[in-house]
Image (spheres, helix red, strand yellow):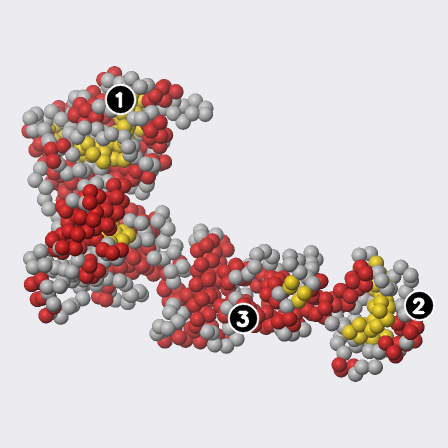
Amino acid sequence: MMESTMLPTASTALVREYAKRLVEQKSARLQVLQALPRWEGEPVMDVGGTAVHVQPVSSQLAAIEAIVDVSEDEFLILLTDMSAADLGDAVMVHTRNQSVEILDQWSAVPSLFGATALDRSLTQRGNWVPAALLERRPASGWPQVPNGSLTGDVVLFALLSSVLGSTGPDLDEVRLLEILDNPSSRSAWRNAPLELRQELIAWTSDVLGTAASLALTLASESPISTLAFGLAFDVLWPDISGSAEPNQVAARTRVERFGNGPINAGAARRLADSAIAMVLRRGLNDTPQLMQVLTQAEELLNDLGWAEGAERSSILPQGLAARLRMLGQALDTDNVRTENVLAAEGALREILGHHKAEPTNPEIVAAQMAVRVGRWLTRVEKPTASLEESLSLQMTDGAWIDRARSAVWSGSVHESISVSYNKLADQAAARRASRDGVAAAQASKWTQAGAGTSMQSVPCIESVLEDVVRPLKSRSLLIVLDGMSASNATEIAEGAAARGWQEQVRVANGGAAQRMAALAVFPTVTTYSRTSLFAGYLKAGQQSDEKALFNGPLFHKNDLRAPAGQRLSTELSAALADQHQPLVAVVLNTIDDTLAKHDPGGTQWRLENIQYLRELFDSALEHGRTVILTSDHGHVVERGSTSRPVPGAGTRWRPETSGPPSDGEILFEGLRVLAPGGKAVLPWLEDIRYGNLQAGYHGGASLAEMAIPLLVFSRPGWPSPAGWAPAPPQAPVWWNERVIAAEPVPGGRREQKSARKKKQTASPSLEQMPDTLFELEHPPAVRAPVGAEMSIAESVLASTIYHEQSERAGRRALTPGRVQAILQVLVEYRGRVHKDTLAQASSVSSAQMNSELAALKRLLNVEGYPVLSQDSDGVTVLLDLKLLSEQFELDHQSA
């Protein structure tokens, strides 16, 4: 008989395994296991419908009695501390091999996984492994190994997954976090025996790393999502080697209670990275589960006494809100200056670096537009000398600022930011009002002058067909978007480009390759301007007049209704398909209709937002038609207007007989004034109306109303009309390019030598902002050495190395003039420029700029060094000024 203290206690799970094998083998009805003669389980086990009795015995007589009590179709397992000799032949004769089997929990493990061999390193983990495997065996069994060899990692991965209530592929850090994000998995983990959790945590640390074991430790101690811990750790340990603030250090200490002691900084950082990776892999859609995780992370930081830590996060909502507030602080002034915009530029970079800064989020759009408005306000306003200049400026600049300030006007849900946006909008409105006043006076004088004063580059609406459309000499589709302003046109053009259309611009007479404007009839209402467009001369009328006067098929709103199964009416489709029909015209009223009920300023004008517009573009492509987009007038948006009721007045114009012009109004008279009597008083201030309150208005003399956009689109590969060419990007420079601090870029060696003697001082920057939350990047000063009295670009082109590079490039080399133009822009903006800005400098389309950049890289990237490269965003071009200087030896004479 063995000492009882040396014998194991037979667990239910282990005995069941022996019972299963006893029944399957059927070589004997009795198995004797050497163990403590103690049994707390059921006396009879059901194994696949077969009864297996389990009996602890301490004498030969008890063993014989147990054998006698079991029927012939049943099986028996004896648990005893006796040896085979003590039991005698009367008992052992009924057993297989006439032996007492030593109870070995490990012996049952291979068969659990369908294996024949066991990795010996697994046994070194301890007897808790087989006990746990037997106790927690799933109903469907453990996963079966394919090659017969059972490794420790396979076993323990399976065991950990089972404890967590998870199935699926092998675990890694991110997968473990995903499982622990499930409340039921965390609950199952916390309910597992402490010893089992501790052993699995130790194994996880060896196999998956300290971050995974930290995740399991945290899940053992708290119901908080492990993802939430990771997001909190992201700001608690942003840099494992960097310094920390006192409140941050205190919060790290307090979080130790969840980690059973000090938390390893490297493990915390890796856990944070895995949490962020998982959150981003899911996407940052505001699902209830994700919002709960984000809220838990913010609440955890608050409980740790460092609530402001959430404002450092690039994932948590408070982080985005803090960045937006910083932008608001930068622009919270009644007089925007360069230093304000520099601060706002830095804040915007931080905003766009936040992972919840979705491009379509109105808050993000407003922030981007606010910075653009700020850039615009810091630019020197140059007065226009003529109505033609004012109308052209509206297309190249005013349209874009109108678009930007509409987003700023729509504002933010954050009250503190709204105050800043309000101030910004007021400053932009004041400058725009000044432009409108000048342009209205120019238009009034020009209109009064009568015939013989035609403008060179800006046609009148009544001459658009004769002077612009028909000379294209291509099968065309003219789409008149009633009420489309120049601002709307900027968005619609982007939508057309996104669908593969190439904008064309007229380049006759050596003019700038820019979008064309036309001048509306006064007052700027549909009755006068649209009828004059289709008639080809000044004419007031209605839809029926337009159809009678237009030389070609013309389709209005009711003509577009299609039968079931069609997007366009049968008649319109037939007209577009007619090879002998040079010009088809369609009027779309979506924009004008929004002026009555909707918000034209808050609407994003994409092709999909305007009924039938996308379908018309698609049909034009199918039938090979050039698309011409124009309008009859623009509009102003309701932004707190003042009502001046006048009998017989329109919404934005009144009869001359109703009284002389007052502040914000001007008298128009002449042949192009089709109001009764050839005279009318028109407001040029946006906030004057004579009719009922609406979402928007037209009829007045603001630039937004009288400047009509005229856009022409073809497909890449189609020949450009005579006198037209693919348009370079049309956005003004301030739309894409940041404000640069007022630190001069040296122009020559003598200036550079002088600069070396001076102490370099920081330009106005974010350090001047109180209580900023982030350390923001400032544009570095450019101090590339150049030749005497030469610009950097000129010095490059004059260098021997450049000539060698140009000879290697052969015919593929860019012209020196084009290289110089691109380099000058890159240097001016300190080596970081939007691709569209460079395309404008080269007078090429955005698509053509890709080949220009490839050719420029061949010239500048000497021996493959990346002097010129592109950022990961796909639109930013980078010039390494220091490397440029080294590669082209610009400083070899200035030592």
- Residue 200 in sight from this viewpoint: yes
Q: Residue at x 93, y 68 (%)?
A: 68
Amino acid type, residue under disc 2 in the picture: Val
For disc 3, the neighbor class at 10 Å (few under 14, some 14 to 19, many from 20) is few
| Horizontal side, residue 162 vs residue 250: left or right | right
- Element marked by disc 3: helix
Nearest to the observer: residue 649 or residue 164:
164
Q: Residue at x 44, y 52 (%)?
A: 283
The crowd level at tag 2 (other Cα within 10 Å; few <14, some 14-19, many 20+) is few
Number of residues whose C-alpha sits closer than 10 Å to that of mark 1, classed few (under 14), some (14–19) or many (20 or more)? many
Which numbered tag is attached to residue 68? 2
Q: Of helix, strand and loop, which one carries label 1? A: strand
The residue labelled by disc 3 is 206
| Front of the two marks 2 and 3 | 3
Q: Is residue 494 above or below residue 36?
A: above
Location of mark 1 (residue) = 583
